[in-house]
Image (cartoon, rainbow, N blue to C red):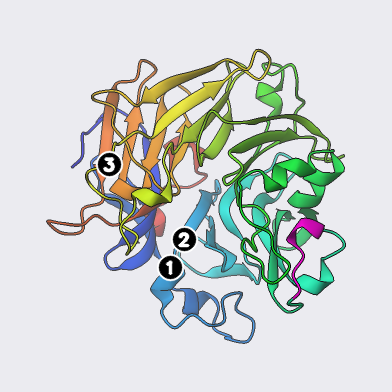
Amino acid sequence: MINEQPDRQDAILLMGFFDKENQARLVNRDGSVIRKWSLDYFEHYPDAQTRPCANLEDTLAADVHGALLTPKGELVFSYEYCGTVKLDPRSNVLWALDEPSHHSMVASEQGGYLTLGRNEWPAAEVADRFPAFFSATPDEKILEGVVLRLDEQGQIIERISIPEMIMENGLTALLTTNSQDFKVKRITRNELLHANKIDELSTEMADKLPLFNAGDWVLLMRGQNLVMVVDATTQTVKWHQTGPWIRQHDPEFRPDGKISILNNNTYVSVCTWHGKARLDVPRDTNIMVIDPVTRETEIVFGSKPGQEMLSVIRGQHKLLDDDGVLITEFDAGRVLEIDGTGNVIWEYVNKYDVEFVGEIANAKLYPLSYFETDCKECA
């Protein structure tokens, strides 16, 4: 279902499952496809020996999450925990990074890109660094979340441990706040934390947020219900808060001096055994904003009649220049645009058949003036 906005000179990038394949597509407001990229993991990583996810038997298992388009029409995206790829407008591979990147892909004002990755260690090698996660089984794996800074050629120029950053700022207690057991016989939570977004404070917006400076990062950790802002150079945590959001995603700096968060506001217990969200649970996902100075929060969309949403996992929102928001409701395979007063003015549902929708992991709006050439030239 599509509600058209015919006078808008823009297009929307959609990342997800279309035409029975993982795909990126740039669409008009009427849903027609301007440009599409078929995303075949085995084609982009033909050498099984160097694939970040070497054991995959089906290319569809490497779904996509985190993407952007450059002004040249190039697509930069992550296969979830399975690598970062840059394609030209005609789907040729410019580079492919053999790194388990995930969730987030943003262009940095410093050049290159910011994304998230993770190191995998035998437990014995990190027992001194992370004693709360010590295991008597030395080969058991520990997963350490990291920030990755990439240059334009896809080379890693900086790798920063998020757990170490938290500990070095005197916030070690935050790593163990979700009541999971830590036993010497086995590790019951081998992922030290689950980071799912990084974003950078732009120079243009920095003077609106007096606690922070241009180039600072906002990071989000799902299991700890934690959002924090960090100096990108010194890795000093300038601000952090746990809740009232629950298993949240996608923090964004706002031009009104606040931070906007997609509050999933639910738990995985609302899913059936095979991972689908039940239809009888409240659709209570919302967009929440917080003033980092006063710490006052407000729900600006969702959690009321006519604004129902549910993203048990994932989900995204992007602030628009006209005070609107583009929201990706992952579980519903839906993208909706709201105006500054919370009215839904555009909606796209990725219908698969009469019963199911196809996933949409990311959506981003681009004015056509953003591109250096006519996107249709690449079709």
Spatial CA distance of label 3 from label 1 is 33 Å
Circle 1 residues within 10 Å: few <14, some 14–19, many ≥20: many
* Residue ID for mark 1: 39
Mark 2–mark 3 contact, CB under 8 Å? no
> Measuring 21% from the left and 34% from the top, which residue is drawn there?
3
Instruction: Evaluate whether residue 158 shows in this view.
Output: no
Which sits earlier in the primary sequence, circle 2 or circle 1?
Answer: 1
Q: Is residue 133 magenta?
A: yes
Point out the residue furthest to the top here: 294
> Measuring 59% from the left and 50% from the top, which residue is drawn there?
105
Q: Nearer the viewer, residue 52 or 308?
A: 308
* Residue ID for mark 2: 64
370 up-or-down from 124: above or below: above
SS of the residue at dot 1?
Answer: loop
| Percent of width and height locating residue 164 | 81, 51
Q: Which residues are magenta?
A: 131-136
Spatial CA distance of label 2 from label 1 is 8 Å
Residue 326 left/right relative to 352 = right
76 up-or-down from 295: above or below: below
Location of residue 152 by image quarter: bottom right
Q: Which mark is residue 281?
A: 3
